[in-house]
């Protein structure tokens, strides 16, 4: 009887392959995931508001920076592109982020909702992202999750409330979800 490895016949790509692809993709454990179609207008408005709110609140923190839609290369077989993120003590600037963000925002859309809610949640927890925020444009609310003992714990659902993010770097800020959903 022939023996085979479970994933022997599945495609397995690397960052070198990823750099050659046209269009928008994420690469998770060597498997490509298309990010198309392009996000709709509501998605983009909400993400712009998240970025603006982060940038304005992080002005007082010289160590932390808000970034929109940047590639985060976790390893040679995993590259993701969160909608918005916060990184502290940014390492050398290059074409991609190589260090773990402190906060990741994902604005949900029907084609990616399951991947963002389940698969990426596990991926981000394994890589010790302190806060993971899922933003639901259809209901105009966000779920804030905080990493506790290696797993995400729901801090609450937010529509027009504020939440204080504590980044452990002598940097904490109050974030307004009312501003995010003001579209």
Image (spheres, grey):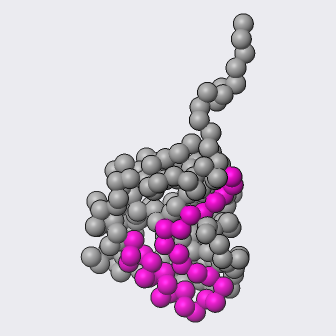
Residue at (66% x, 58% y) in the render? 74
Residue sitting nearer the eye, 65 or 79:
79
Residue at (27% x, 76% y) in the render? 183
The quadrant holding residue 73 is bottom right
Res. 121 in view: no
Q: Is residue 49 magenta?
A: yes
Residue at (38% x, 76% y) in the render? 48
Res. 109 in view: yes
Residue sitting nearer the eye, 58 or 72:
72
The quadrant holding residue 8 is top right
Q: Position of residue 144 (x, y in %)?
A: 48, 65
Q: Would residue 43 be found to the left or right of residue 124 on screen?
A: left
Q: Is residue 11 magenta?
A: no
Q: Outermost residue, bottom direction?
A: 60
Residue at (62% x, 39% y) in the render? 12
Q: Is residue 95 above or below residue 12?
A: below
Q: Position of residue 41 (x, y in %)?
A: 28, 67
The magenta stretch is 47-76
Circle count: 0
Residue sitting nearer the eye, 68 or 181:
68
Q: Outermost residue, top direction?
A: 1
Q: Position of residue 163 (x, y in %)?
A: 48, 76
The N terminus lies in quadrant: top right
Residue sitting nearer the eye, 44 or 141:
44
Q: Would residue 110 be found to the left or right of residue 60 on screen?
A: left
Q: Is residue 27 above or below residue 95?
A: above
Q: Position of residue 10 (x, y in %)?
A: 59, 31
């Amino acid at each position: 009887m022939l023996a085979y490895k479970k994933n022997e016949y599945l495609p397995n790509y690397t960052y070198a392959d990823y750099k050659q692809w046209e269009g928008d993709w994420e690469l998770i454990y060597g498997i490509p995931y298309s990010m198309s179609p392009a996000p709709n207008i509501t998605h983009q408005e909400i993400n712009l508001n998240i970025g603006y709110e982060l940038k304005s609140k992080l002005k007082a923190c010289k160590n932390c920076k808000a970034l929109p839609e940047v590639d985060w290369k976790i390893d040679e077989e995993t590259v993701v592109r969160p909608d918005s993120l916060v990184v502290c003590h940014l390492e050398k600037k290059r074409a991609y982020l190589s260090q773990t963000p402190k906060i990741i925002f994902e604005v949900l859309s029907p084609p990616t909702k399951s991947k963002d809610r389940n698969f990426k949640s596990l991926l981000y927890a394994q890589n010790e992202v302190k806060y993971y925020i899922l933003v639901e444009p259809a209901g105009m609310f966000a779920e804030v999750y905080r990493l506790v003992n290696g797993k995400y714990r729901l801090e609450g659902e937010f529509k027009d409330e504020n939440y204080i993010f504590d980044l452990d770097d002598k940097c904490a800020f109050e974030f307004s979800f009312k501003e995010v959903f003001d579209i």
